Image (tube, grey):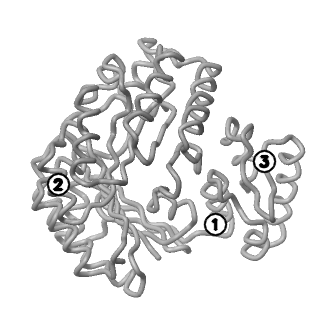
Amino acid sequence: MAGIYIHIPFCRKRCHYCDFFKSTDFGLKNRLLASLNHEIEIRSSELSSEEINTIYLGGGTPSTLLLGELKELLETIRQNYLVSPDAEITMEANPDDLNQSILSAWKEIGFNRLSIGIQSFSETDLKLMNRRHGVMQAIQSIKWAKNAGFSNLSIDLIYGLPNQTIQEWERNVRIAVELDVQHISAYHLTYHEGTVFYDQLKKGILKELPDELSVQQFEILIRILKEAGFEHYEISNFCKAGMYSRHNSSYWKGRKYLGFGPSAHSFDLNSRRWNVSSIPSYLNGLENGETYSETEILSEQDRYNDSIITGLRTIWGIREEYIRSRFSEPYFAHFQNTKDKYLQAGNISYLSGTVSLSQSGLFISDHIMEDFMVVK
């Protein structure tokens, strides 16, 4: 089983918190799409015998593309790869790009999962983040998606925003529950260098939410979604029964994937590859047969640390036998010692040979994963 990720690097507007690679200049869009389709074709041998179980269009904002452009990308994949009949095919979308007809058309050409970047149900928060949509657009987009036949809907929310109160965050979560979506991804705001929020933080225009309030918001998120029947299957992800993001889960379970487009990453179990984060350089590489990516062969330490970062953050955890069989004795010994330390503290669970975070461990997950990792 393998996955395909396509990075669409165009946005109509820059959100103040976002550090993903993107551009608001659509002037090179046609050349970019031609190169993207070309990359999909020429790299097909990398997964020639693998069945593709997930396809994910992210960005940037894939929903800015025209229907014909999206259809061509999917057709190029189907012509060059063995795509499973029941493959999960996800489109990331902004609410203001959506209407009933376009959603129905996306469903018809093969998209069966939608991830809508709502981020907040507060007009004040949306303006602070420089989002393009309003609250009513967000709510309406979900209704349209349901009417179009999408039964696998995910929404993104952000908490830990400056001045965001406990009451405001609880209201956000409860609205999300009422909308009856199948999946919710909720991320704590991070001030990434190079973003407007980072600059405003350094200048004192914004102030980080106190840690205790962020923890309370996370607790509220977990409690309300659990009461509503959601499973907390990854630190930031919740779903109704069985409605995991199959694509993202493949990352966390260490499966192969190919990434197409500028800044996209690929993984083949033994190496990582990443495309250049520059549209002109990407185009030059594909159009002139020149290098547009870098590759790193993973050392034993890299592979071990990747297993920690991806596995420990999910409910599936890390099988002790996996570490024993895949890595040399020093790594297994370090894993065992760290496991014993956090097991005694109650921050991890150990059941049937599998190590996973406990409820209390979720709140210090970064620290726990850092301890499990090996640095030489």
Residue bearing the label numbered 3? 348
- Give the spatial CA distance, label 1 vs label 2: 42 Å
Q: Residue at x 31, y 19 (%)?
A: 123
Q: Is residue 226 above or below residue 316?
A: above
Farthest residue to the bottom: give it.
49
Residue type, numbered disc 1 = Arg
- Give the spatial CA distance, label 1 vs label 3: 22 Å
- Give the spatial CA distance, label 3 vs label 2: 44 Å
Q: Which of the labelled discs sits on residue 104, or is there none?
A: 2
Q: Is residue 74 above or below residue 193?
A: below
Q: Residue at x 36, y 59 (%)?
A: 264
Mark 1 burial class by Cα count in 10 Å: few <14, some 14-19, many 20+: some
Residue bearing the label numbered 1? 303
| Badge 2 element | helix
Residue type, numbered disc 3 = Ile
Residue 22, can we see it? yes
Q: Quadrant of the C terminus?
A: bottom right
| Residue 180 in the image, given as x and y percentages of width and height | 40, 41
**In front of the other: label 1 or label 3?**
3
**In front of the other: label 1 or label 2?**
2
Residue in the foreground of this view, choosing between 64 and 118: 118
Q: Residue at x 33, y 46 (%)?
A: 21
| Badge 3 element | strand
Q: Which of the labelled discs sits on residue 182, or is there none?
A: none
| Residue 179 in the image, given as x and y percentages of width and height | 37, 36
- Decide if residue 4 is on the left or right side of residue 336: left
Q: Earlier in the sequence, mark 1 or mark 2?
A: 2
Mark 3 burial class by Cα count in 10 Å: few <14, some 14-19, many 20+: many
- Decide if residue 191 is on the left or right side of residue 98: right
Q: Residue at x 46, y 18 (%)?
A: 168
Residue type, numbered disc 2 = Ser
